[in-house]
Amino acid sequence: MQNDINDIEDQIRTATAIIKHGGMVVYPTETVYGLGADAFSEAAVQNVYKIKRRDLSRPISIAVSSFEMLHEVADIDSEYFEIIAELLPGPVTILLRKKDVVPAILTAASEVVGVRFPDNEIATRIIKETGPITATSANVSGRNPPTCIEEVEVELKLKVELGIIINGGKCKYSMPSTVVDMSKATANEKGEIKIKRKGACYDRVLHVLRSKAVGEGLHRFSVS
């Protein structure tokens, strides 16, 4: 067991160094395995798009390791923070209005960024040291996202040059995150909150939004 612990510690240190030097890693989360690179480096993000064969018109989410880091990348009205704190950390991607520090390449030039705060110790320990990283599944676009390292495609493994694939075991939920759009929810405009994709813990997310959002009458709420 001690050897396994030391191995994970070594992998976390290695992954942190790789990301800080512009590389990318495959890392575990509670949903699926992600492809992580420095979210503030346009060159690193460009490589993520290239390896995934992902169209630049499709945004990539970012992952943070604390609410303080979340505030650094996105605008959050204090009126809605209680809702966000109920959902995160956890298997939820929240769409918010981005701050200028977030590169346009990540958001396909839109003002909205998807943010994950993973409920996974390996992921959050890496992010704590590196700052925000990309939170996109470690697969070629259009193919199934991996829920264990054995499912990471050979094609992608070969392309993660100078990187590392961290074995964090089987992902807890083994399905993509539920996506909640709060980008139009502001204190002044009473915008609409939408569930844009049903994923992990969908029922719990629905319960939180119905009890917090609808119950307090803060804004409209819908599932689309």
Image (cartoon, rainbow, N blue to C red):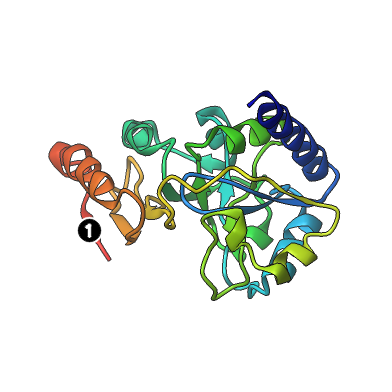
Helix, strand or loop status at disc 1: strand
Q: Quadrant of the N terminus?
A: top right
Q: Is residue 20 above or below residue 112?
A: above
Residue 156 visible, this angle: yes
Type of the residue with mark 1: Ser
> Extreme top residue here?
2
Q: Residues within 10 Å of mark 1 (few under 14, many from 20)?
A: few
Whether residue 72 is visible to the viewer of this picture, yes or no, is no
- Measuring from the top left, give residue 202's x and y in whole percent: 28, 52
Count of numbered labels shown in the rendering: 1
Place of residue 197 in the rendered image (x, y in percent of width and height, measured from the top left): 35, 62
Residue at the spot 24% in from the left edge and 40% down from the top edge: 208
Side of 111 where 12 appears, left or right? right
Percent coordinates x, y for residue 56 in the rendering: 65, 72
Q: Judge whether 211 appears above or below 22 on screen.
A: above
Does residue 17 appear left or right of residue 138 in this picture? right
| Closer to the camera in the image, 118 or 28 | 28
The quadrant of the image that shows the C terminus is: bottom left
Q: Nearer the viewer, residue 158 or 18?
A: 158
Q: Position of residue 107 (x, y in %)?
A: 59, 60
Residue placed under numbered mark 1 in the picture: 222
Question: Which residue occupies 40% across, 49% down?
Answer: 173
Identify which residue, 188 or 164, lies in the foreground.
164
Q: Quadrant of residue 140?
A: bottom right
Q: Residue at 70%, 68% (x, y): give it.
A: 154
Residue drawn at the location 49% of the way across and 50% of the way down:
97
